[in-house]
Structures are given as C-alpha cells and as structure tokens.
Image (tube, rainbow, N blue to C red):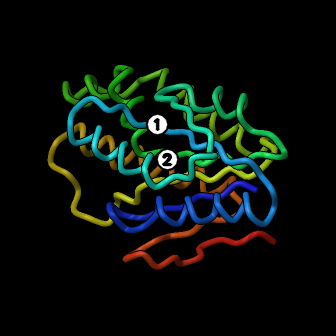
C-alpha cells in the first residue's frame, strides 16, 4: 500500500506516520525502514533530526537520501517492509537548490530544471510498482498567502504539484491538522 500523510508545520503528520509504521510492524510483521531526506546543515536542523531519531524504535532501520528518492525506494521496498519517507517537502527543497530551479526563480527566468523534473517524475512513475507499505510524509503549504519572494513562490507551487501527483498514485491519503487525522482517500 502507498500512503501519503499531509499536514502543516507541527501538525502531527510525522507522529501519525510513525504510528502507522509501528502498526505495520506489529499487526503485519513488516520490518520498518525510516528514509530521511533532511540535511542537518545547522544546529536547528541537527536538533530536529535528533528529536525524530529519539522517537523511533531502535529496531527500525534508518537511511538517508537527499536527492535520488526513487532510486533509493527501489532498493528498499520489499513485500516484508514498510518504508517511511520523512519528508517529501525537504526532498523537494533539496532538489530545488541542488539543481538550477532556485537560481532561475531568483533571476526571474523560466524554470527548466532537469533534476527537479526527472526526480519527481521518477518517483511518481515508481510508486505504483513498489511492493510493501510505503508511507510518505509531506507538508501542505498552499493555505497561506502567496509568498512575495520568487523562490518561495516556486517552492509553494512545486510542493502543491508534487502533493497532487503523489496523492493521485497513493491508495490512502490523510490530512493531519492539530494532531487529528482526516481521511481524504481510502483504499477501495
């Protein structure tokens, strides 16, 4: 099963994803692998990573992938495995800044970023084919005002597009607000 869990900052989406991964292990006997997309480039992000790490059971595997998510998922996914990807938002940010998209947006140019285009397309194409339970966490960033800065607008637009495309290929989609899950799409 492919599952997308969306929410705003500190909405409880990661906690819900971890709960669903635990249930996969306890009820279905799946091993759990946590696939982190964050880069701990400063003290604040290092503390966030440490906080997430402390919450996870010791028996869960953990790996990192900042850019080539589809390739890494292809390696990890298996019928006996639950892979929890936390999160698509940081992955998208990594793609925007590793490629030319952020620079192009800053310069007011049209966006033509092969890294962004190819990596997001690879994820969307691969997800329906993966075995096991895949849980993807992502931020819902489109409910505020339109950002003034071109890179922020690009990010909000691309995050909305990515969430739509991932939701379309997932069997289950849940929105989390104030720690409460709201089912948007269920299997069957």
Q: Which residue is mark 2?
A: 86
Q: Is residue 118 above or below residue 126?
A: above
Does dot 1 land on a helix, a strand or a loop?
loop
- The residue lying furthest to the front in this view is 58
**For residue 26, above or below residue 50:** below
- Residue beneath disc 1: 37
Q: Nearer the viewer, residue 129 or 179?
A: 179
Image quadrant where one finds the C terminus: bottom right
Percent position (x, y) of residue 5? 54, 61
Q: Report the side of 83 relative to 68 (left or right).
A: right
Q: Which mark is residue 19?
A: none
99 with respect to 106 (left or right): right
**42 relative position to 64: left or right:** left
- x%, y% of residue 179? 42, 75
**Quarter of the rendering occupied by the N terminus:** bottom right
Q: Residue at x 47, y 46 (%)?
A: 87
Measured from the top left, where is residue 125 in percent x and y?
70, 37
Residue at the spot 27% in from the left edge and 29% down from the top edge: 41
Q: Please say if the residues under marks 1 and 2 sit with CB atoms less than 8 Å apart.
A: yes
Q: Position of residue 96 (x, y in %)?
A: 36, 30
Name the one closer to the observer, 138 or 22.
22
- In this view, the residue farthest toward the left is 148
How many badges with numbers are in the image? 2
> Where 188 sits versus 106, above or below?
below
Residue reaching furthest right? 79
**Helix, strand or loop status at disc 2:** strand
Circle 1: is it few (<14), some (14-19), or many (20+) Cα within 10 Å? many
């Amino acid at each position: 099963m492919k599952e997308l869990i969306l929410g705003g900052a500190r909405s409880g989406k990661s906690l819900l994803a971890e709960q669903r991964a635990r249930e996969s292990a306890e009820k279905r006997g799946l091993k759990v692998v946590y696939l982190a997309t964050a880069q701990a480039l400063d003290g604040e992000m290092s503390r966030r990573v440490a906080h997430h790490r402390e919450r996870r059971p010791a028996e869960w595997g953990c790996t990192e992938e900042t850019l080539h998510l589809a390739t890494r998922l292809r390696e990890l996914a298996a019928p006996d495995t639950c892979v929890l990807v936390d999160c698509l938002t940081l992955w998208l940010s990594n793609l925007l800044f590793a490629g030319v998209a952020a620079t192009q947006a800053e310069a007011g140019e049209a966006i033509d970023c092969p890294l962004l285009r190819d990596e997001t397309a690879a994820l969307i194409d691969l997800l329906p084919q993966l075995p096991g339970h895949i849980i993807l966490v992502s931020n819902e960033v489109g409910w505020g005002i339109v950002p003034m800065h071109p890179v922020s607008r690009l990010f909000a637009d691309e995050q909305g597009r990515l969430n739509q495309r991932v939701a379309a290929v997932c069997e289950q989609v849940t929105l989390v607000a104030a720690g409460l899950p709201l089912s948007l799409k269920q299997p069957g």
